[in-house]
Amino acid sequence: MKLSDSQIERFREDGFLILPARFSAAEVEVLRAELPRLFAERRPENFREKESDAVRTAMGLHLRSEAYARATRPPRLVEPARQLLGEALYIQQVKVNAKAAFSGDVWQWHYDFATHHGEDGVPEPLALNLHILLDEVNEFNGPLVFIRGSHRRGPAPATLDTETTSYPLWVVDDATVAELIAEGGLVSAKGPPGTMLIFGDTLVHGSSLNMSPWPRTIFSVILNPVSNALTRDRRPDHQHHRDLTPVAPLADDCLLAPDAVPAGAGS
């Protein structure tokens, strides 16, 4: 369940980890099976692409689905975050980011703390983004691209972009991105379904268009220390949850155990 010393050292140095085969095909299928129903819902939590009706990101999933409620609590997800941060954590955000085949749009160069601080008043860049790949992610279907070591500079200058895509985002300018890439280089977060990604709040990252015939869906949980909670209620709950109850892991097989936690239990 826990990270090795060498993995922790690599995370501190690079700002991210790519961990293959952390979740089984059966566990991934439990989450994939819920998506058609969740994506079909017409509600504010589902953000859709500008040029199509495809869902770009679907939020608050642990409040809408028993399976996703369980998915926020496997020890394989929670324990590494607690190990890295060393204190009680609350569920800040739960979502699936999707890039539909042939039409999935870009995510501009950004880092998450710019939004967490600028919109939600989170004091420090401590939150961790924990991802599970639900599809095969390759160089053709819009993988996340990390700028290795970009977190070591601290929060870069960022501005709010409300025009480029359907999801407003605090983005990093091209000149800064070029400098960071020259220093650390680029890494594509690729892998088969069940691969887990961990990255920090000031790591600069983005993703390109999906020009392939293959969808790319990624489940994401953001955990943040309770001591570092939001101080501003500018955004709705599904974008930053107000429930600061520390997340507690369930049994390791919780994704395959239907009665592990009731739907809507939150954190």
Image (cartoon, rainbow, N blue to C red):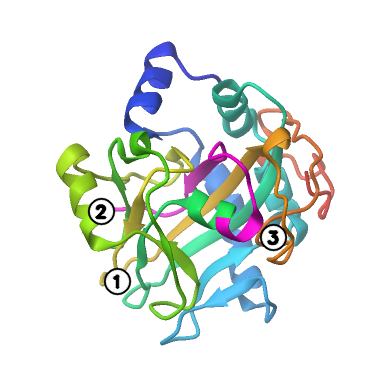
Q: Secondary structure at mark 1?
A: loop
Q: Residues within 10 Å of mark 3 (few under 14, many from 20)?
A: many
What numbered label is drawn on residue 176? 2
Q: Amino acid at mark 3?
A: Gly
Is label 3 or label 2 in front?
2
Instruction: Say which residue appears at 55% left-offset and 59% top-offset.
Output: 96
Q: Secondary structure at mark 2?
A: helix
Q: Nearer the viewer, residue 141 or 201?
A: 201
Which stretch is magenta? 118-140
Left or right position of 21 against 68: left
Left or right position of 258 against 191: right
Q: Amino acid at mark 1?
A: Pro
Instruction: Say which residue appears at 59% left-offset and 45% top-offset.
Output: 222
In terms of image quadrants, where is residue 247? top right
Q: Amino acid at mark 2?
A: Thr
The numbered mark, 2 or 1, whose residue comes first in the sequence reads 2
What numbered label is drawn on residue 60? 3
| Mark 3 and mark 1: Cα distance apart in space | 28 Å
| Mark 3 and mark 2: Cα distance apart in space | 32 Å
View extreme (left): residue: 182
